[in-house]
Amino acid sequence: MLDFRVDTFLCVCRYMSFTKAAQTLGLTQPCVSQHIKFLEQHYGVKLFSYSNRKLSLTDAGQQAYHCLLLLHDEEQSITEHIHLSAGKKRPLRLGATLSLGEYYLPARLETFMAKDSSLEVNVAIADTSELLGLLDEGSIDCALVEGYFDKGSYEYISLGREEMVAVGGPTYKLTDADIFSCHLFVREPGSGTREVLERYLSERGFSIASFQQVSVINDIPLLLSLLRHNLGISFLYRLVVAEDLRRGTLRRIAVAGQPIFHELGLIWRKGSIFSEDYRSIAESIVACTTPQA
């Protein structure tokens, strides 16, 4: 069991404030300071530094934060495994991006949960950048993402490649056959879908700003509705628009160049003692029935 002062350290790291940590933990600020001083003496390093009245982690503090956070969350997972051996369900805190949470996960998760009744699955839906933050702070165990991430900081297993396609309403007309003259509907910054599109455009010397008109829509059902009403175009994963393409409520728009494919993955924090469990979960999800496109 980790020393209780580790919780104080992690709380200070979360808020970068001794005062806020004290309020959150129900401690006095001198008590928080004593806890940090104890850890600094124990490890023989300075964990925090002040510059221009701003608190920050030292290099040693950064290393301590990542190691102690991992240990803190592994301890929680160990407790859950022990409960499981006693007949209790083990929670799986799963994250997923909006696209995958709404259009990839449901059918697979239903089959997956039916196959393994020992898990109590909790799902958090957020964009890629938010999910990485939740992983780093230990709020979720693993996450389904389609955006980019630092493969040096996380372990992952591929769930396959998915095509991103340009789509518009059934009667949407391109002005002068120039895609950049269209009204582009795009996801919010931090979205994996947007980041993939931005990189694709950048590699060809363009950007989102190259489009004549751009609207940011962070709700996929609303974005699809706008497209169905012939108000613009968007770049979305085929799994998101498969049903609309089948029904003819959206149509695919030809884009010059190579098709856009991107890898989907299940990721978790590097060094986790439960890496094999997460790999097994990913393999089980992939093995579940794939919805028809």
Image: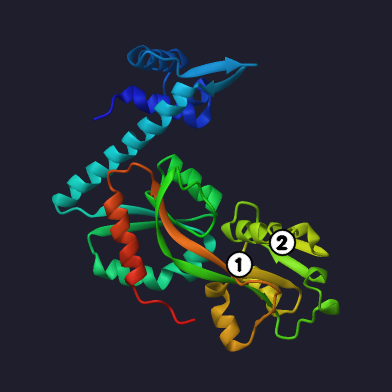
- Mark 1: amino acid: Ile
Q: Would you place residue 51 above or below residue 106 in this image? A: above
Task: Rate crowding at label 1 as few (under 14), some (14 to 19) or many (20 or more) other CA atoms within 10 Å.
Answer: some
Task: Say if 289 sits above or below 180 in the image.
Answer: below
Q: Is residue 147 above or below residue 247?
A: above
Numbered badge on residue 204: 2
Q: What element carries label 2?
A: loop
Q: Nearer the viewer, residue 183 or 124?
A: 183
Point 28% across, 59% down: residue? 280
On the picture, is 89 further left or further right than 180?
Answer: left
Does 225 sit left or right of 240 as displayed? right
Q: In terms of depth relative to the viewer, which is nearer, 78 or 45?
A: 45
Q: Which of marks 2 and 1 is nearer the N terminus?
A: 2
Q: Is residue 24 visible?
A: no
Q: Which is more toward the observer, 173 or 137? A: 173
| Image spot of residue 78 (x, y percent) | 23, 42
- Which numbered mark, 2 or 1, is in the foreground of this view? 2
Whether the residues at callouts 2 and 1 have beta carbons within 8 Å, the answer is: no
Query: Which quadrant of the view contains residue 278?
Result: bottom left
Q: In which quarter of the image is the N terminus?
A: top left
Q: Label 2: few (<14), some or many (≥20) within 10 Å?
A: few
Q: Which colour assignment does the render follow? A: rainbow
Relative placement, left or right, of 247 versus 269 is right
Would residue 281 be seen by someone viewing this image from the given angle?
yes
Q: In which quarter of the image is residue 4?
A: top left
Q: Where is residue 45 in the image (x, y as percent from the top left)?
A: 41, 15
Residue marked by disc 1:
220
Say which amino acid is labelled 2: Arg
Query: Residue 31: x percent and y percent?
Result: 41, 15
Q: In this view, does 241 lie above or below 44?
A: below
Query: Residue pushed farthest left?
Result: 86
